[in-house]
């Protein structure tokens, strides 16, 4: 295996704080590496240093010659005035320059310039680039190629940026939190692509299923050092526990030896003059090694809910729409005491609007919400914390509550309470606009829990929390003596917490599924198999090419690739038309025929998209 990247003695500091020191590791062809660490310990900085976005203090970063590298930032930059199509044509990619020159030649109309541009397009072999781009964006649910970037949501921008990187066909792709702001369907699509792709990967993510299913190596940043594990996330969890136990045992031995040596050193000064020099040096070395602190500072969520009565809330015939877009259509439901509900669905289906209507933040068109008198909502919004960013942390929290009473009478000052969420007295003097994403998430969580809510509504709480904090939050919610509604794209988080799911399918359709997310996906797959079997249609599977060497398309494969692209476009249009018909409320006389056709189209699309991806990975 070729060595793609070698990191030697890399050191990086921010101010007087060392993020990592003398770090050394390498990436070989085919490695899929996940980087794990607590918030603020340098995960993103490490990726930015490797990608050349940040300077390093010392060390060496060496890439294999002519290596194509793609880098996805947490907040990808796209030119606001560009169209989606233009935004995907990376100006740093040679193919994009050729395409631009060809488009200009067509506009110019000069035969000699056009002939030269056509020859360059032939030489680069990128006549199908635009078709490939359109097909890829369609799979990522971006259908309007001419839409202005300024009009895109955060999730749409992330998908456009992902499409651009895939089309660059990099040898090494560096991804910083690629799952943030994506819906579960898109996350699973990206997960599948990375698993099938031969591209080497270096990635930071808190999505544990993503790490487990994609990565074959884990790198952990801990106490300014790097620890490497040759396995997936599940393997890392086991081996990390063994490492911590071994370090604790070694530290105990060091401290025991140090006590004996301290006694030896404490003897009369005149006796010490004759002591062996090497033993004195060894004593000071032991003393330095004994200063290692293996205790881990974690947030303390020891905040109990206030009493909640038997009546929670009832939704009676709720309807809501924005123009032609239906959010709820005659929705009726009675929420039970201690219920834990997960909400999933594609971006734009109305998940956030639903929970805002429940709290009265957004008005409904018709129907009634009946909320129990003892219900006290605690709302963690994906829009972020609503505090004055120009104020200090302690001042902003004190303005909200000068005295915090939790757990039946225990009283804390804001300063004491914030320390439960890892805000030291020094951290509390920071201005809110200077906080990192993880610090903002912890502060947001603190302001929610300090009111002792008994009904927690969490809208995408996992975006900026590290894996350790997520685990603590999961344990807290599992034991929480109140009600919980969670909107999340984190499948592990949903599986750990919820009793059942509301599946927002669009156009006001909500399915109540009695189980967690993994059980729902299993149900979906079994249902798809049942429908396929009932249609008596054989499934076609395509095996991934065994060769790890990149090969070019044959002439017949090129024609097949172009044909499949057009077929996917037509099938997608037909599927969308049937979905609109099913959701229209019209009487459908041949429902059985159209249902069979819809299932047939879904199966065909899966087959053709898989084949399209296999062919697209060839040069």
Image (cartoon, rainbow, N blue to C red):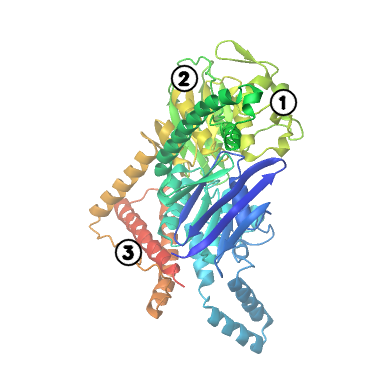
* Residue at (57, 85) in percent of width and height: 119
Mark 2 Cα shell of 10 Å, populated few (<14), some (14-19), many (≥20): some
* Residue at (56, 44) in percent of width and height: 225
Looking at the image, is mark 1 or mark 2 nearer the viewer? 1
Residue 49 percent coordinates (x, y): 63, 54
Disc 1 + disc 2, Cβ < 8 Å: no
Residue 480 percent coordinates (x, y): 47, 22
What is the number of the mark on residue 394? 1
Sequence order check: which comes first, mark 3 or mark 1? Answer: 1
Residue 548 in the figure: left or right of residue 373: left
Foreground: 122 or 582? 122
> Marks 3 and 1, Cα distance to the nearest angstrom?
59 Å
Can I make out residue 70 in this image?
Answer: yes
> Marks 2 and 3, Cα distance to the nearest angstrom?
49 Å
Which of the 4 image quarters holds residue 439? top right
Foreground: 83 or 173? 173
Mark 3 Cα shell of 10 Å, populated few (<14), some (14-19), many (≥20): few
Foreground: 263 or 217? 263
Can I make out residue 315 in this image?
Answer: no
């Amino acid at each position: 295996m070729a060595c793609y990247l070698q990191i030697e003695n890399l050191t990086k500091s921010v101010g007087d704080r060392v993020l990592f020191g003398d770090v050394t590791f390498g990436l070989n062809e085919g490695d899929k590496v996940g980087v794990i660490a607590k918030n603020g310990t340098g995960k993103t900085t490490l990726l930015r240093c490797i990608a050349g976005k940040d300077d390093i203090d010392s060390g060496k970063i060496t890439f294999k010659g002519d290596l194509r590298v793609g880098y996805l930032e947490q907040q990808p930059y796209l030119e606001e005035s560009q169209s989606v199509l233009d935004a995907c044509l990376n100006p740093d990619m040679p193919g994009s320059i050729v395409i631009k020159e060809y488009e200009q030649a067509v506009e110019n109309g000069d035969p000699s310039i056009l002939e030269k541009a056509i020859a360059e397009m032939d030489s680069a072999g990128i006549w199908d680039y635009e078709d490939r781009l359109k097909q890829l964006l369609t799979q990522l649910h971006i259908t309007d190629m001419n839409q202005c970037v300024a009009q895109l949501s955060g999730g749409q921008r992330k998908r456009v940026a992902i499409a651009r990187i895939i089309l660059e066909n990099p040898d090494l792709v560096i991804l910083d939190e690629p799952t943030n702001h994506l819906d579960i369907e898109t996350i699973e699509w990206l997960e599948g692509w990375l698993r099938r792709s031969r591209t080497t990967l270096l990635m930071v993510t808190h999505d544990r299923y993503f790490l487990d299913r994609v990565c074959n190596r884990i790198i952990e940043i801990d106490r300014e050092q790097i620890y490497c594990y040759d396995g997936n996330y599940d393997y890392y969890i086991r081996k990390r526990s063994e490492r911590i136990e071994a370090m604790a045992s070694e530290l105990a031995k060091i401290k025991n030896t140090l006590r004996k040596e301290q006694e030896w050193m404490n003897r009369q000064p005149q006796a010490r003059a004759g002591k062996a020099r090497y033993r004195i040096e060894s004593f000071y070395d032991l003393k330095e090694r004994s200063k290692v602190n293996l205790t881990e500072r974690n947030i303390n969520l020891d905040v109990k809910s206030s009493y909640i009565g038997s009546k929670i809330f009832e939704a009676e015939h709720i309807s809501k729409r924005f123009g032609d877009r239906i959010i709820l259509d005659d929705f009726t439901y009675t929420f039970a005491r201690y219920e834990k509900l997960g909400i999933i669905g594609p971006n734009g289906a109305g998940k956030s609007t639903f929970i805002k209507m429940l709290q009265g933040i957004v008005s409904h068109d018709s129907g009634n919400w009946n909320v129990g008198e003892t219900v006290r909502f605690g709302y963690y919004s994906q829009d972020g914390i609503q505090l004055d960013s120009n104020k200090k942390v302690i001042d902003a929290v004190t303005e909200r509550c000068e005295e915090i009473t939790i757990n039946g009478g225990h009283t804390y000052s804001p300063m004491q309470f914030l320390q439960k969420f890892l805000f030291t007295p020094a951290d509390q003097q920071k201005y809110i606009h200077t906080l990192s994403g993880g610090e903002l998430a912890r502060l947001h969580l603190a302001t929610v829990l300090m009111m002792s809510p008994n009904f927690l509504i969490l809208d995408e709480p996992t975006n900026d929390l590290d894996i350790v904090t997520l685990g603590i939050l999961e344990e807290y919610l599992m034991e929480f003596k109140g009600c919980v509604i969670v909107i999340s794209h984190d499948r592990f988080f949903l599986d750990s917490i919820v009793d059942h799911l509301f599946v927002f399918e669009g156009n006001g359709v909500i399915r109540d599924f009695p189980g967690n997310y993994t059980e729902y996906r299993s149900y979906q797959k079994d249902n798809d198999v049942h429908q396929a079997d009932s249609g008596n249609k054989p499934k076609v599977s395509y095996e991934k090419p065994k060769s790890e060497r990149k090969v070019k398309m044959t002439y017949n494969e090129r024609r097949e690739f172009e044909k499949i692209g057009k077929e996917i476009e037509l099938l997608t249009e037909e599927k969308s038309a049937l979905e609109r018909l099913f959701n229209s409320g019209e009487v459908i006389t041949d429902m059985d025929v159209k249902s069979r056709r819809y299932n047939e189209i879904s199966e065909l699309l899966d087959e053709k998209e898989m084949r399209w991806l296999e062919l697209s990975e060839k040069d």
